[in-house]
Amino acid sequence: MLVDDHQTMLWGLHTLIDAERPRMAVAGTARTCAEALAGAAQLRPDVILLDLDLAGVSTVEFLPELLANGVSRALVLTAAHDPDLLDLAVRRGARGILHKEVTAEQVLKAIAKIHRGELWFDADTMERVFGQMLGWRRALRPEPPAEKHAALTARERAIVSAAVELSGSANHEVAQRLFISEHTLRNHLSSIYRKLDVPNRLGMYVYAIRHGLVQPDQAGRRHEGFNER
């Protein structure tokens, strides 16, 4: 579902997405928050592509309600660059953020990734938002002991490095880089998550950056889209 108060933008996005049939299609459009809320509840679209400003009304305030159907995932397409506003959108449920100057190819790629359950954030947003979340956790408990890092085997450290470098890639692509099967990779990741006390690859990524488990140049080569699985 497309949510934007500019008719020309809606028309352009509608044309772009419907040209991808049957891979994806527009379920509906909305130009006001009321229309968006009604459409999300009735249509239950897989992905809601929305602007953050509808004629002066911020859709950030309505994001949790837009996603209340339990099916839809939100992808923000905005001209705004205010980091506080974008961070708030993420905290309220947005799975990705696109700026309106991106290419048509990036829009389609981001929609597909969000539909697959992945995330689409630029590096600055991801480090800022999830770094804050990790900071809150650290404020509630002591600094993680060195024993956590020492518990990782050399192979597990190599997997952490590869997963960070290929942060926009699926598990099977990381496994190919390491010359192991995807099943073996998943077993290693489960062990790493347990030892570092993180829930998934995203948590491992943030932990690795914040606690120096990877070199800065490895983190710098990460992709724009982040594979959550």
Image: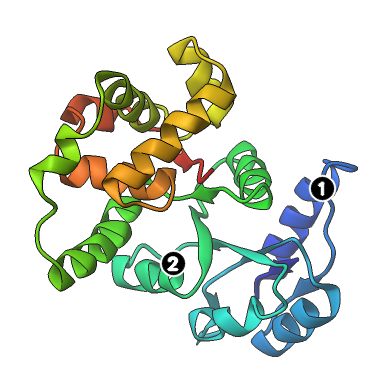
Look at the image and tell me in which quarter the C terminus lies: top right
| Identity, as a three-letter code, of the amino acid under mark 1 | Met
- Residue 131: image quadrant is bottom left
> For this view, does 4 lie left or right of residue 145?
right
* Closer to the camera in the image, 37 or 188: 188
> For this view, does 155 lie left or right of residue 90?
left
**Secondary structure type for disc 1:** loop
* Residue 55 percent across, percent down from the top left: 57, 84
- Residue 29: image quadrant is bottom right
Q: Is the residue marked by circle 1 packed among few (<14), some (14-19), or many (20+) residues within 10 Å?
A: some
* Closer to the camera in the image, 206 or 159: 159
Discs 2/1, front: 2
Q: Which mark is residue 185?
A: none
> For this view, does 24 lie left or right of residue 2?
right
> For this view, does 26 lie left or right of residue 130?
right
* Label 2 sits on residue: 90
**Secondary structure type for disc 2:** helix
Q: Residue furthest top?
A: 179
Mark toward the start of the polypeptide (2 vs 1): 1
Look at the image and tell me in which quarter the N terminus lies: bottom right
Residue drawn at 56 percent across, 81 percent down: 64
* Residue 110 percent across, percent down from the top left: 60, 46
| Identity, as a three-letter code, of the amino acid under mark 2 | Val
In this rendering, is residue 62 above or below 22?
below
* Label 1 sits on residue: 24
Q: Is the residue marked by circle 2 packed among few (<14), some (14-19), or many (20+) residues within 10 Å?
A: many
Residue drawn at 62 percent across, 51 percent down: 117
In this rendering, is residue 7 above or below 171?
below
* Residue 224 percent across, percent down from the top left: 43, 39
Residue drawn at 31 percent across, 19 percent down: 155
Note whether residue 167 is visible: no
